[in-house]
Image (cartoon, grey):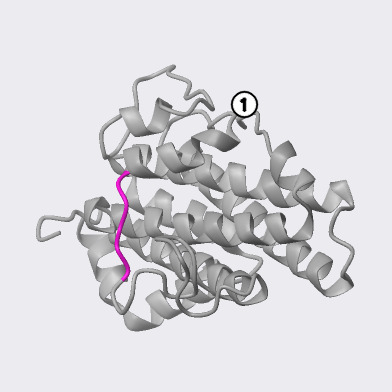
Amino acid sequence: MEHRQAGGAELRERVADGASRKRFMQMVGGAGAATAFAALVAACGSGSEGSEGERVQGGVNDPASQGGSDLEITQYALLLELIEADFYEKVIASGVVKDPKLVDMAKRIGENEQEHVDALSGVVKQLGSPAVEKPKTKFDSVLAGGEAKILATAAMVENVGASAYLGQADKIMSEDILNAALAIHTVEARHAAALNDLAGNGLRGSGEFVGAVPDGAFAKPKTMDEVMKLVKPFIA
């Protein structure tokens, strides 16, 4: 991380300005997320560009098989957010969850994930690449398992999402994109904590991605390959 580049002197001064950083984080946390991402990437320039005309498909190995530039990391994060957003959409549409409080939570978390999708899509475009295609997902077995299976899966997916962002933090070159990724990371972790509690997993669960603090006092990051193996069963 010592050689992380922030896109020139002007951007470095902006990152060093505490007030500017605070305003940025406030935007990311609210309805202005997409605007904030677009603004930060415009400031960063397009130092991490993909091949001209290249289109990233929504397949399992596409983003993970590329390197680790800011663009590729953003494409990878976007693919994960697309899967999450689609999961909550399918859960709500299925009508399997009957508890009004759980339905409301699923809607709220789904809205968060869709905001992440919209924001990350804007970053990918600003960095000079077409958006990642929405993958075809398969959650039929989860939905068939009823409310308990849905809660357990949601908790696991959110824990995986948090570990995925953590796994890329030291590879992100732009300070602004790093701030944005961490802002999403903490939301994913909060989602995971709430869902693990509802699922009855408590603080520590029975597996690596089960429980509000499944990794103990220090969360363990996951590589792209490790994360993609975990989400592969949900991709048709």
Q: Is residue 133 above or below residue 215?
A: above
Q: Quadrant of residue 3?
A: bottom left
Is 227 in the magenta? no
Residue at which label 1 appears: 236
Q: Nearer the viewer, residue 165 or 53?
A: 165
The answer to whether residue 35 is seen in the rendering is: no
**Residue 213 makes an appearance in the image:** yes
Considering only vertical position in the picture, is 17 above or below 91?
below
User: In the rendered image, which quarter contains the C terminus?
Assistant: top right
Q: Residue at x 36, y 33 (%)?
A: 64
Q: Nearer the viewer, residue 92 or 133?
A: 92
Q: Main secondary structure of the magenta part?
A: loop
Local crowd size for mark 1, using a 10 Å CA cut-off: few (<14), some (14–19), many (≥20): few
x, y percent for residue 117:
59, 48
Q: Which residues are magenta?
A: 219-223
Residue 167: which quarter of the image? bottom left
Which residue is rendered at x = 58% and y = 69% of the image?
A: 191
